[in-house]
Image: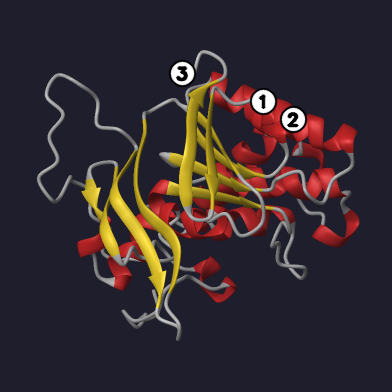
Amino acid sequence: MRSLRRSRGAPTPDDLDDGPLEAWAVPTAPAGGLSFEGEAVPVVVLHQAGRTFAGPPPVEALKPTDLVIERGEYVAIVGPSGSGKSTLLHLLGLLDTPTAGSYHLDGIDTVTLSEPERAGVRAARIGFVFQAFHLLAHRSIVENVMLADLYRPGGRDRRRERAVEALVSVGLEHRLDATPATLSGGERQRVAVARALVSEPSLLLADEPTGNLDTATGDQIMALFDDLHGQGLTLAVITHDRSVAARAGRVVGLRDGEVIEDRLVGSGMR
């Protein structure tokens, strides 16, 4: 395996032929002293976590927030533009760090991690689905999915096997060698879902997953999320669309960087 600088924050397509990315340290045991006696450790625990951008003037994009997402829960995070949804997404996805408070993911105190450790935890424990798909145009869809699996043990053959399994699970077994340009919008989003699933994450984060899709195709993607939740996956969907939010078990509403509602709309759990 080629030597990787520890300062790198993410793998690149050139790493596809290598073994697992051992240059990133991935914490595997809870850190920071969280204790939930007799209970499973929640996937997400935000305690007075906030994010202020320095400015000038300083902007408090997310006010100190408490949020717990239990394992197997399906949460919709809603709010208008400027409400703090994107800031919260970036904190939950370890794409940014709180300027106040703490964030534990699977019991790991993420605020204390180095950037390489954060990159490793992000890749191993969080799956992302974005509105814009973010697929590599010059790679086949199976290679796009393989790229998200570089942190786990196994060579290229094992990574391809897991990528194929993920694509089969979203109904794309017949398009393995296709490139993104040859796919419909719905198929591209299914590839993005497969990419998010291949590392068997603790948390799937979806940012406006139906924003670039027509209504019928969007309904198909949300039905896929329903199925994934039914299989026990923990989901947090960021959306401004109340019809999308209605499919979740719980709605967390934001306005002006503050949580203004947190309510169950269904069973709330699998």
Q: Which residue is mark 1?
A: 246
Disc 3/disc 2 C-alpha distance (Å): 19 Å
* 1 and 2 marks in contact (CB < 8 Å): yes
**Element assignment for label 1:** loop
Numbered tag placed on residue 52 in the rendering: none
Residue with the most extreme top position:
267
Q: Is residue 44 visible?
A: yes
Q: Which residue type carries mark 3?
A: Met
Q: Residue at x 76, y 39 (%)?
A: 172
Q: Identify the image quadrant of the N terminus.
A: bottom left
Numbered tag placed on residue 243 in the rendering: 2
Asked if 211 appears above or below 132 in the picture, the reply is above
Drawn side of residue 131 relative to residue 185, left or right: left
Mark earlier in primary sequence (1, 3): 1
Disc 1/disc 3 C-alpha distance (Å): 14 Å
Q: Is residue 23 visible?
A: no
Q: Which residue is mark 3?
A: 269
Asked if 132 appears above or below 45 in the picture, the reply is below
Q: Which residue type carries mark 2?
A: Ser
Give the quadrant of residue 7. bottom left
